[in-house]
Image (cartoon, rainbow, N blue to C red):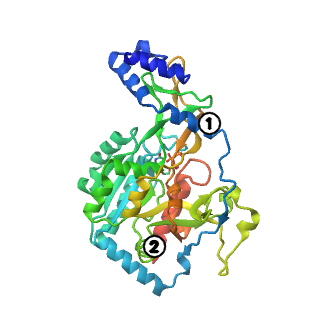
Amino acid sequence: MNKYRSVVKLLRKYNQEQVLAFYNTLPKEEKELLLDQVLNIDFEKLISLYNEFQKDVSYTDAVITPLEHVEETKLSSYIKSKYIKKGEEIIENGGLAVITLAGGQGTRLGLSLPKGFFEVETNPKKSLFQIQCETLQMANIKYNTVIHWYIMTSPDNDSITKVYFEDKKYFGYGKENVTFFKQDTLPVLDFNSKLILDKAYKVKEVSNGNGDVFSSLQRYGLIEDMEKKGIKYVFIGGIDNILLKTVDPLFIGLCDIGNCKVASKTITKNENEKDEWVFARRDGKPSIVSSKRITKEMEDKKDENGKYLYKEINILAHLFSIDSLKLCANIDLPYHLAEKKNDYLNDEGVKIMPKSPNTYKYEQFIFDVFPYFDNILLLSVKREREFAPIKSFTGIHTPERALELYLNERRNSIKG
Ligand code: UTP
C-alpha cells in the first residue's frame, strides 16, 4: 500500500481525517513531512491517555503518611559546616553538573520566544538564561572549577536557543562547557479528542513534560558522558526561578553523607498555595500527593519539634546521583493531564490563538520517580532566599514579584 493510503486508513481508524484538510494544496516535500509525522504518532497511546483521564485516578486508596524533612534554619552552624565541607569537596573535584530544564512552552506567559530569553528588569536587563549562567560563573570562581551545564530544549525551541547562545557568545561560559539536548514531544488533543494542526503540513506536538529529562539524557548518551567526566551528582532545576540555587554545597553534602541518591528542596506552603501538592509517603514510598488527600487535621499536624508534617511543597530543585539517573531513565513514568492554550490552524487555514485553554496536554513529571526510592532527602529552605519563579503576568508568580525577591536577596547577601 502506498504511504498516503496507509495514512488515510490510519486516520480513518482513529477518526482523525481532519489532519489532511490541506493535504491537496501542499507541495510534495510538505506532503511527505505530514505523512511521515502521522505514521510516527502512537495513536493507541494517545487514545489510552485520553480515556484514562476521563476517569479519576487520584490514588484515593493509598495510605498517606509523613515524609521526614530537614529544615535548613534548624541546623547548627557546626553541623552545617561539616556538610558544606563535603559538598564543597565534591564541587571542587568536578563532581557536580547542572541541568536547566528549558523545554517547556511557557503558555501562561504567552511568549513567542523561548522562556529562557525572557528579560528581567534588572539594571541592566538580564535574560533568564543569563541569570542562571551568572550563578554558575560565580560558583566556578568560588570553587575553582568549571561546572558542566546541560540544557534541555524541545524540538520547537532547540535551534533558536542554540542560535541565541551563539549570538550571546555563551555569556562567556565557553561553548565546550554547555551541552544541549532535546526532549521528546506528544501531540495535543482538543476537547473532542481531535488532533489539531500547527501548520498545514504539521500536527501540533508539544513537549511532553519535564519528566522526560531522564530518558532524553539516556537517548543522547549523556549519563555515560557525565560518568566519563567524573560527575557524581546532577542538580536539575527549572529555567524560570531566578533565585534557583543551582550550586549548593550544603544540599550536596547532606545528600552524600546521608547516603541518599535523590534529594529535593522544598518550602513550607502558605495561604496562597492551598492547592499545591505536598511531599508525603504514599503507601510507604516518597511521593508528592494532591492536596485533596490532605485533610484539615493532617494539614495542622506537627511533629514533636513543632514541624508541620504535610506542608512541604516542590520548588523544582532536585539533586540526583549518577546511579539514580540510570535507574530513572528506565522508569515508565505516568502522564498527568493539563489543559493548555495551544494555537492551531482553523478550517480556513488561519492561525488562531485561543484566549483560554483549548487542548489536553499530557506531561510526565520528575517527581514521579521519587516512589522508586525508599528514601529521598528533603531540605526545606527559606522561600525568600531560593524561590522567585516567573510563571505569568498575573497571579502570584509575576516578573515584578520575582524581581523584587531577587533584588532583596542580592541586597541581603551583600550585607552578609
Ligand atoms: P512549567 O510547569 O512552569 O511549564 O515548567 P512551562 O511550559 O514553562 O509553562 P506553562 O505551564 O506552559 O505556562 C517548569 C519547568 O519545567 C520545564 C520548563 O521549561 C520550566 O523550566 N519544562 C516543562 C520542560 O523542560 N519541559 C516540559 O515539557 C515542560
Using the image, tell me which numbered label, if any, was put on residue 413. Answer: 2
Tell me which numbered mark, 1 or 2, is placed earlier along the sequence: 1
> 115 or 75, which lies in front?
75
Residue 350: horizontal and vertical position, in percent?
Answer: 51, 21
| Quarter placement of the N terminus | top left
* Residue 278 visible within the image: yes
Report the quarter where the C terminus lies: bottom left
Confirm whether residue 125 shows in the render.
no
Residue at mark 2: C-beta within 8 A of ligand 1 = no
Location of residue 179 in the rendering, given as x and y in whole percent from the top left corner: 30, 52
Q: Residue furthest bottom?
A: 78
Depth order, front residue of 361/65: 65
**In terms of image quadrants, where is residue 74?**
bottom right
- Distance, label 1 to label 2, CA atoms, is 51 Å
Residue visible at 56% across and 75% down?
Answer: 71
405 horizontally vs 83: left or right: right
| Mark 1 in CB contact with mark 2 (< 8 angstroms) | no
User: Which mark is in front, 1 or 2?
Assistant: 1
Q: Tag 1: residue type?
A: Asn
Question: Which one is in front, 103 or 222?
Answer: 222
19 shown above or below 111: above
Counting the numbered discs, the total is 2
Residue sitting farthest toward the top:
24
The amino acid marked with disc number 2 is Ser
Q: Which residue has dot 1 on it?
A: 51
Q: Residues within 10 Å of mark 1 (few under 14, many from 20)?
A: few
Q: Is mark 2 on a helix, strand or loop?
A: helix
Quadrant of residue 396 within the rendered picture: bottom right
Q: Which residue is drawn at 49% across and 19% down?
A: 349
Q: Position of residue 340 (x, y in %)?
A: 57, 39
